[in-house]
Image (cartoon, rainbow, N blue to C red):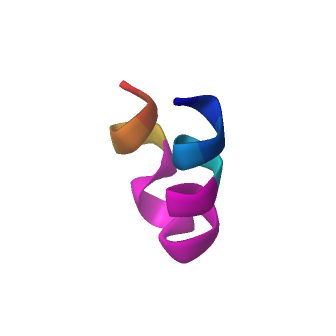
Amino acid sequence: MNYETSREKQLTPRSAPATRK
């Protein structure tokens, strides 16, 4: 789960906070 969020964060740094939530 953590690794997935990290991957998305790299793809969309702007959506980082949104994905984390």
Quarter the C terminus occupies: top left
Highlighted range, magenta: 7-16
Residue 13 percent across, percent down from the top left: 56, 64
Instruction: Determine whether 18 is above or below 13 in the image.
Output: above
- Is residue 15 shown left or right of residue 8? left
Residue 16 percent across, percent down from the top left: 50, 49
- Is residue 1 shown left or right of residue 15? right
- Is residue 6 shown left or right of residue 18? right
Residue drawn 45% across and 31% down?
20
Instruction: Determine whether 5 is above or below 7 in the image.
Output: above
- Is residue 10 shown left or right of residue 11? right
Residue drawn 47% across and 63% down?
14
Residue 3 percent across, percent down from the top left: 65, 42
Instruction: Determine whether 1 is above or below 5 in the image.
Output: above
Counting every numbered tag in the picture gives: 0
Question: Which quarter of the picture shows residue 7?
Answer: bottom right
Residue 4 located within the stretch drawn in magenta: no
Residue drawn 40% across and 56% down?
15
Residue lying farthest to the top in this orientation: 21
Residue drawn 50% across and 60% down?
8
Residue lying farthest to the bottom in this orientation: 11
Residue 8 located within the stretch drawn in magenta: yes
Residue 5 percent across, percent down from the top left: 53, 43
User: Mainly helix, strand or loop, the magenta region?
Assistant: helix
